[in-house]
Image: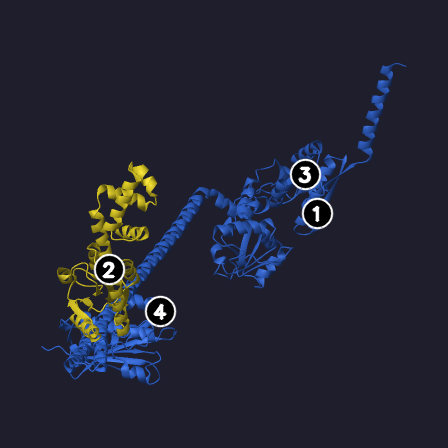
Amino acid sequence: MTIRTVGHTFLALIILLLHASAVCAAEAVRVGVFSYQGAERAESDWASTFKHLRKTLPQYSFYAMPGDLKTLTDDVAANRLDFIITNPGHYVELEAEYGAARIATVEIQGGPVPSEAVGAVIFTRAARTDIASLHDLRGKRLAAVAAETFGFRQAWREMLKEGVDPFSNLAELSFTGFPVKRVVDAVRDGTSDAGVVRTCVLEEMVAKGLARADEFHVVAAHTIPGLGCQTSTRLYPDWPFVKLSHTSATLAKQVARALLSMPVEANRQDWTVPVDYHSVLDLYYDLQIGPYEILRQHSLANILWSYRYWLTLLALSLIWWIIHVLRVEHLIRKRTRELHEANQKARLRREELEHASRLSLVGEMAGSLAHEISQPLAAIANYARGCERRMQQGGDQAEILHGVRQIAAQAERGGEVVRNMRSFVRKRQPFLCRLDPDLLISDTLALFAPLAERRNVLIELEPHDSLPAVAADKLQLEEVLLNLLQNAADAIEGKPEGKISIRASSAGGVVEIGIADTGPGLDDEAMRRLFETFFTTKPQGLGLGLSLSRSIIESHGGRLWAENIPGGGALFRFTLPVAKG
Amino acid sequence: MTGEIATVYVVDDDSAMRDSIEFLVSSVGYQCQSYASAEAFLEVFKAGEAACLVLDVRMPKMGGLELQRVLAGQGATLGLVFVTGHGDIPMAVTAMRGGAVDFLEKPFNDQRLLDCINEALRYSMRMTNAAKCRAAVVTRLAQLTARERDVLDLVMAGKPNKVIALTLDLSVKTVEVHRSKVMEKMAVMSVAELACCVNLAK
């Protein structure tokens, strides 16, 4: 036995086995068929095709597997189908998702070209004249079979083009489900204003006597030559015969060859080379569904991305603007604070100076007063003691008399010192001018404002009629007013509700100005001695303010007096004669 | 008290003050003279007099403290009592350092002033006597010869006659003669008295 002989025998065996399998067990080929009008209808629609395939390729057993879109898609996903005949919409989805490929497109002899054969109609009852265009569908009720049907999607695309989004611009969008007749019924009985069905459905129903030719009106209708039906949409390619990804190339080739060679039968249906399905993809793109669903999800991101440079610029400008605003704000606050602090410091400094000058004045006055007074006092003591000694010794009467006279003289001198003191502090002669009392008040309030602010004193100027001018020394009167304001502020010190009111009036040839406070008022002793020189109720007071104020007012020919306000507080009032001429 | 009438000078620019102090002081028997300014007082004042000066610190032109300095420069032996209307501590310290007896503030107690005047007079007399004594010693020292002066110095240094003789290259006898001359001229009886006198003059 040679090796050659063995080889021959082996080869023969393999050929025999292969032949046996091909003949004996015909391989099952499952062809899914989209059945939008029921399983039997699907069978009958494609009966000639199956008959032809079975005849041409007897080594395969072709099984028609009718199903709706979801069932078919599931079958494809599970590799339960080898081929599928479905509508163009479903096909492009399968192509995108599962790598399905068309191998032939159905063709109706004497019908439209296969690349423009499928459309949809939007129809109303013929009586409805209010829906002339797709635009008129806005706010109306629309019925369709299902959202996933190709027919509805075609209608959707056309409506969207006219600015009507079926999902948001309609009064109602209802899906009846299969069969298509339900849509027609919904429109017919008025449940919906309009309906969406595949092209030729209405014409077929009329042909079968299920509808009257004048019963319905197609919106935006145009007739396609060769189709013989009205359509509301542009047209799309006809149904394809689709090979699935796992189907072997050999089988696909055999099936394709068989389809293309299929003779035209009574239903005028045959198969031609697959046409371009880009127009279907365009529809999916426009509606952002199926393979383009991702566009819908990312459309905002896409927009942002496409405008990224402008958006960046905008963001930068915005940031710059915010920073600028914040910076300006910050600077304003800082400068305001600095200014405020500077003011505060200046005010404190001014007050310190005021205080210091006041203190030094007190010291100086006390010193000079002590010196001036101690001189006559010492002399008086000396004279008195001298007299005493002389009298004890029985001394000379004339000498004692001299001593006693000197005592009297020195006592007078002491009195003179005190008088001089008083005249010293008021020695300036008033310089009388015509003065507007309102100006006096406002200028004094301006002078007093820093102190009032620091001590948080509320000053109210009561409204009054216009006042005649007075003859007055403005500086001296400001001194008086400041003094009265200061006293009032001291009186309400520590009272949160404390308030000073200024009132002014004129009557009988005098102008009267009053300063009222809400302090504790004046007790009997204070009331009696208020205007005495060196009488004071304040720990740091000199007791000069009111006595000086009174002498100033009196030197102007006016009066200054105080009274208690019933219910609390003191009122200081002074009058000034109205200027003559 | 010495028996003779002591003078109390009053210098104050205030006439009432002057007059009243004079009135008071004369009531106890002192002789009193008052002046309106330091300058007026200096014109008439002679150093070496035992007297009391009551003076005001603050006056126009020359003040009390300045007058005190001027008087010290003249070798005055006055007892000073300051009176002031408004004195302060530095003023008082300066016055007391300059030898003032007291520093009174107006108005003052009359007895206090009189006591001060008394003390000032006593002080002045002591000072005046010491000054007189010193002047006498200086006069006597001036009468000594050069050789007597040398002997005096060595005696004051506590040297015995022998050492003095050796130092001055003199005989002990000669030294004894010089020494007795010195005692005579200086009008002292003992070395101790001599030493006291010489120290006074230093």
Q: Colour of chain A?
A: blue
Q: Which residue is mark 1?
A: A66
Residue at image coords 31%, 43%:
B154
**Lateral position of residue A368 relative to residue A109, left or right:** left
Query: What is the three-letter code of the residue carrying label 4?
Result: Asn
Mark 3 vs mark 2: in front: 2
Q: Colour of chain B?
A: yellow
Q: Position of residue B19 (x, y in %)?
A: 17, 72
Residue furthest to the left in view is: A581
Marks 3 and 1, the one that precedes in the sequence: 1
Mark 3 vs mark 1: in front: 3
Badge 2 density bin: few <14, some 14–19, many ≥20, Cα 10 Å: some
Query: What is the three-letter code of the residue carrying label 1?
Result: Pro
Evaluate whether label 3 is on the same chain as label 2.
no
Residue furthest to the right in view is: A1
Q: Which residue is mark 3?
A: A244
Disc 4 sits on a residue from what chain?
Answer: A
Q: Which residue is mark 2?
A: B129
Disc 3 sits on a residue from what chain?
Answer: A
Q: CA distance from mark 4 to mark 1?
A: 94 Å
Q: CA distance from mark 1 to mark 2?
A: 161 Å
Q: Are marks 3 and 2 in contact (CB under 8 Å)?
A: no
